[in-house]
Amino acid sequence: MEFKNRLKRAIERGRQRSDDLSRAEARKALSDEELRRLHSQYRLELSEQIEVCMRQLAEQFPGFDFENLVSDKGWGAAVSRDDVEFAGRRRDNAFSQLQMLIRPISSSHVVELAAKGTIRNKEIFNRTHFQRLEEADPTTFAEMIDLWVLEYAEQYSAGT
């Protein structure tokens, strides 16, 4: 009889520990409002980084136009240029653009950086990088922004 009582108490303690862990995890998880606030904070910080890098890129290559982007697709910036090339009697247009955006918050609660690069009518990359909001590291995103702008500049200057 005594073993039966101890067994019941052990089972109850196990259930209690499980409930305590569940409550602790629930408290630890961010609320929707906190996630929105965190996303806004990252969006502002990262879109500023995008703007700084893109402006500097446009300054290095005369003819590029800088544009801030704010739409339902996200916040960021773009640089672009339209070149006209003449070969004999033929006239060709060559379009180059780099666009980077921080996408709006979604139900998956991630910070998402999207970039698309085109050089002389040829898409050279179309990328995204994302992290869950709870685990997001703005430094990683800032480094990714720098890296992608530098890669675009290198490929553009090489004539790719």
Image (cartoon, rainbow, N blue to C red):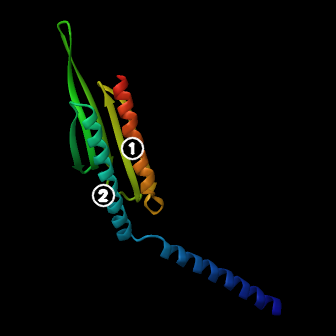
Q: Is residue 61 left or right of residue 131?
A: left
Instruction: Find disc 1 in the rendering and name its residue.
Output: 146
| Numbered label attached to residue 98 | none
The answer to whether residue 69 is above or below residue 107 is above
* Rendered-image quadrant of the N terminus: bottom right
| Residue 1 in view, yes or no | no
Residue occupying the far front of the picture = 60
Q: How many marks?
A: 2
**Residue 2 percent coordinates (x, y):** 82, 93
Q: Say what amino acid the circle numbered 1 marks.
A: Asp
What distance separates the C-alpha of mark 1 from that of mark 2? 16 Å
Q: Nearer the viewer, mark 1 or mark 2?
A: 1
Q: In the figure, residue 154 lies in which quadrant? A: top left
**Residue 150 percent coordinates (x, y):** 39, 37
**Residue 148 percent coordinates (x, y):** 39, 39
Q: Is residue 118 left or right of residue 2?
A: left
